[in-house]
Amino acid sequence: MRHEPKRNSSMPSLKRVLGILTTYRLLVLGAITSLLLLIAINAITPQLFRWGIDQGIAKGNLDVIFKCALFLVLAAIGRGLFSFGQSFFAEATSQNIAYNLRNQIFTQTQYLSQGYYNLTTSGQLLTRITTDIEQIRTFFGTSLLQILSGLITLVTSALILLSMNWKLALITLASIPIAGFILVRFFRNNSHLFKLVQAQLGNLNGILEENLLGVRVVKAFVREQAEVSRYTTLNGELLASNMKTVKVLRNVFPVLFLIGNLITLTVLGFGGAEVINNQLSLGELVAFNSYLVFILQPVLQIGFASGVIAQAAASATRVYEVIDAEVDIHNRVNAISLKTCRGEIEFDHVDFRYPGANQNALKKVSFTIKPGEFTAIVGMTGTGKSTIVNLIPRFYDATSGVVKIDGYDVRDLTLDSLRSHVGIVFQDATLFSGTIRDNIAYAVPEAPLEKIIEAAKFAAIDDFISSLPDGYNTVVGERGIGLSGGQKQRIAIARTILTDFSILILDDSTSAVDAKTAMLIQESLNNLMQQRQCTVIMVAQRLSDVRKADLILLLDQGELVAQGTHEELLENQLYATILASQQKFDFSRHV
């Protein structure tokens, strides 16, 4: 049985955004001042018409007519100035709110734990930081002032109408509770629909991002038409949801227009009879009719803004879902700053399960790595090798058991101090748009060129960089487009080498380079260990890369089944089997 999603109100999130207005008091004050002056001019204008008709035209007084015309011209000028003022200040406020929210949500994404990204698509995050924030900005830039203007105008006009003719005023004001009931019902019944639209837009953006990143795979497997069909299906679902919002808006406005027209006809009929019976002057009826617009127009303005309010409320909820997301990996109270690091690592009966997984990725793993040791982690694919190295810098926290560095539980250390002592080269090399120099010096932007070149030589990439026309100032494209996988990997290695680490983690980082380059990097690695006396942990697929390791950890299905040197592990059946299969593969390649 399918359950309907719970329909929680989105308005509290929108109220939180309203709280940001206090940060920009001067801009808000400018917008409100301009708005009030504009409303005052609008309220005075019908009285000018009344004065001109009753005291000027009706009595043939040209002096009154000319004065009335002059005041109307001044009112028109003032209306233009204050209308521009309220629009300018409102737009400036909305842009600042968007700036504030974008900074909040981006800052939060930098500190959210890796587990959060395992359960959230990047398409959804991109939609929230772009489309959702733009919906909120549009609300504050236009709709909020319309609503505020409408409410103030409504109250002001109602008071003036009651003072002019209470009978006609009551007829006119009868439309307000009816329209209010319609709008409240609209919000209550349809707020979930606008949330659905934004969620579907996020899914659509996710598909687009996947295809842009995986365009070569799509072409290689001739899946263009299948991807077009998948995108078209989701786009159709988004269109259907958008059409539902159009339909619910369509059901609101005809009713509001009908109420407005009926009220206008009633006022003209009743007011005309009052003029004929000399109970009301013609000027008063004209003025009253003008104020009638000021009563009905705000109701329609709020009606038109209702869709924007609902969209903004839904978007605010989605934005604050990210901003309020719990940061699982954070500093404990009174966390210790690790000033120096010897590089001793200990796993004590560590279990780990990824968020949303049904079984543990690691099971009761225990081992100790001494300072300065070269340790390799090997095993079949999916046995938990990368999981172990992810627990050391606290990308995740162990489900149970303890991970220690120099005797400290890593959870008792500040994240900055812990990670500053750990250098990591990931399996997938990620480069940023910019120069090669910028990418190597990413963690140490102030590093001199000599140090950058030294790190590049260690990673066996200096010769290639020097051969480029612009050398280290060569601009690489998005995600390192224009470089081979091996070149990107070596730049990533150089980037890590440049940092001041005590523990170096190589997560299968030589898999994208050829055997000769891997051998050069391994030789440099041996020299580095001697120079820096650092602890090195290498996740490796090829056992030929780790023969000289001081300690080899052998994993199988998340369990540490053996540990020792290469010679000691030759007696282990699993290790021997892996080694034999790789030797057979290498032999077949050279035959």
Image: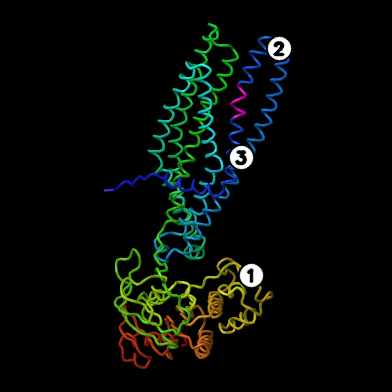
Which of pointers 1 and 2 lies earlier in the amino acid sequence? Answer: 2
Please identify the quarter of the rendering in which residue 467 is found. Answer: bottom right
**Foreground residue among 46 and 453:** 46
User: What mark, if any, has residue 475 been given in the picture?
Assistant: 1
Amino acid, disc 3: Ser
In the current view of this chain or complex, which residue is farthest to the front? Answer: 334
| Horizontal and vertical percent position of residue 306 | 47, 37
Q: What is the distance, in whole Å, between disc 3 and disc 1 at their CAs?
A: 42 Å
Which tag is nearer the camera, tag 2 or tag 3?
2
Q: CA distance from mark 1 to mark 2?
A: 79 Å
Q: Is 42 a magenta residue?
A: yes
476 magenta-colored: no
Which-is-in-front pick, marks 3 and 1? 3
Residue 492: give x, y in percent of width and height: 54, 76
Q: Is residue 325 visible?
A: yes
Which residue bears the numbered disc 2?
61
Residue 87 numbered tag? 3
The residue lying toward the viewer, choosing from 254 and 105, is 105
Q: Secondary structure at mark 2?
A: loop
Q: Residue furthest bottom?
A: 567
Q: Furthest-left residue in view? A: 1
Q: Say which residue appears at 52% left-offset and 70% top-offset.
A: 430
Amino acid under disc 2: Asn
Q: Residue at x 44, y 47 (%)?
A: 13
Residue 516 percent coordinates (x, y): 53, 86
Magenta span covers which residues?
Answer: 40-46
Q: Amino acid at mark 1?
A: Val
| Above or below: residue 450 compared with residue 318 | below
